[in-house]
């Protein structure tokens, strides 16, 4: 019985690629660290922020897998995903989405009235992303925008109010996510053209798409630098920004229009390191600040 339950949990985890939560979570936690400089930190809020992040991402990814089940079944690269391969029933996936949507909304309610009121529209935006590639090549930017709400939401959860500087962190996340999503989409150009799906690689071609992704990541780097001034960071943070810049360059060196074989390395490994380095850098900055 216990092994069946564990296998079921692992199947759900694989469906939503739970390990990829690390892409956005460090940005949200960085927002928490920055917010506590000006606003009192209630430690239970960190728990609810983490639970809200898990709930929102799990619900959004589960919804995406449901919305794309037919498309995934036709794509050789994704045909073995849990729903199209029959490893997970559609109704089970629907229940999964409802369950984690409830977790997100309840967690938001525990963080205050503002967060509770904002939770449903945020969830709607996350769900809507799944349909954008059916009608616009700007889908990558919409994904970046939807995920960029994570640090903004974390800030509001702690501060209970909005502050303009936190938008720089959200914009850094938006352009960072949109850039590597374009890289990832380069794998499916032929399939997307056949299915009538929209993406920047389909619209502009792979070579120009890689250039657009690089430009977005350059913008992301600029936003990372701007955070140094907006939040009066210490030089410890600049070391982090330099490392992130090197990792972004390395990511783009891994991929060329004639060789996309390293996309998974760039997408799954380099990007998770970038997110983690950012959070460690913000923590290091805080440590230096306290010591000084």
Image (cartoon, rainbow, N blue to C red):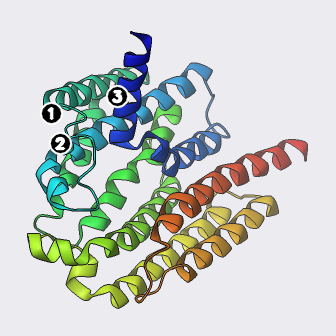
From the top left corner, tell me how far across and down residue 239 is, in percent: 77, 66
> Is label 1 or label 2 in front?
1
SS at badge 3: helix
In this orientation, which residue lies closer to the viewer: 261 or 119? 261
From the top left corner, tell me how far across and down residue 147 is, in percent: 38, 51
Q: Please identify the residue farthest to the right as the structure is shown.
A: 292
Note whether 27 is above or below 90 in the view shown. Answer: below
> Is label 3 or label 1 in front?
1
Q: Are marks 3 and 1 in contact (CB under 8 Å)?
A: no
Q: Which residue is mark 3?
A: 104
From the top left corner, tell me how far across and down residue 43 is, in percent: 62, 22
- Give the mark nearer the N terminus: 1 vs 2: 2
Q: Residues within 10 Å of mark 2 (few under 14, many from 20)?
A: many
In this orientation, which residue lies closer to the viewer: 291 or 205? 205
Note whether 179 is above or below 47 in the view shown. Answer: below
Q: Which residue is mark 1?
A: 90
Q: Alpha-carbon distance for marks 2 and 3?
A: 19 Å
Q: Residue at x 32, y 70 (%)?
A: 185
Q: Which residue is mark 2?
A: 66
- In terms of image quadrants, where is residue 56? top left
From the top left corner, tell me how far across and down residue 135 is, in percent: 10, 67
Q: Are marks 1 and 2 in contact (CB under 8 Å)?
A: yes
Q: Alpha-carbon distance for marks 1 and 2?
A: 7 Å
- Give the mark nearer the N terminus: 2 vs 3: 2
Q: Please identify the residue farthest to the top as the structure is shown.
A: 1
Q: Alpha-carbon distance for marks 3 and 1?
A: 21 Å
Total numbered badges shown on the rendered structure = 3
């Amino acid at each position: 019985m216990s092994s069946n339950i564990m296998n079921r949990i692992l199947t759900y985890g694989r469906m939503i690629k739970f390990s990829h939560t690390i892409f956005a979570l460090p940005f949200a936690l960085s927002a928490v660290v920055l917010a506590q400089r000006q606003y009192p930190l209630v430690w239970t809020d960190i728990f609810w922020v983490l639970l809200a992040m898990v709930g929102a991402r799990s619900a959004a990814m589960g919804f995406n897998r449901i919305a794309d089940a037919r498309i995934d079944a036709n794509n050789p690269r994704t045909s073995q995903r849990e729903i199209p391969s029959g490893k997970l029933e559609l109704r089970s996936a629907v229940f999964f989405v409802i369950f984690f949507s409830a977790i997100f909304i309840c967690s938001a309610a525990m963080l205050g009235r503002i967060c509770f009121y904002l939770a449903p529209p945020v969830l709607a935006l996350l769900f809507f992303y799944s349909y954008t590639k059916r009608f616009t090549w700007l889908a990558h930017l919409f994904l970046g925008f939807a995920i960029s709400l994570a640090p903004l939401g974390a800030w509001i959860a702690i501060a209970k109010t909005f502050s303009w500087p936190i938008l720089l962190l959200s914009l850094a996340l938006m352009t960072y996510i949109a850039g590597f999503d374009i890289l990832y989409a380069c794998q499916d150009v032929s399939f997307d053209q056949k299915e009538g799906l929209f993406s920047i690689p389909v619209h502009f071609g792979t070579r120009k798409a890689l250039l657009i992704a690089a430009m977005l990541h350059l913008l992301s780097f600029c936003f990372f630098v701007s955070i140094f001034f907006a939040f009066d960071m210490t030089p410890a943070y600049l070391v982090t920004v330099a490392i992130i810049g090197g990792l972004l360059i390395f990511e783009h060196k891994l991929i060329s229009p004639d060789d996309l074989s390293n996309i998974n390395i760039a997408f799954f490994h380099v990007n998770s390191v970038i997110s983690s380095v950012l959070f460690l850098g913000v923590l290091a900055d805080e440590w230096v600040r306290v010591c000084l």
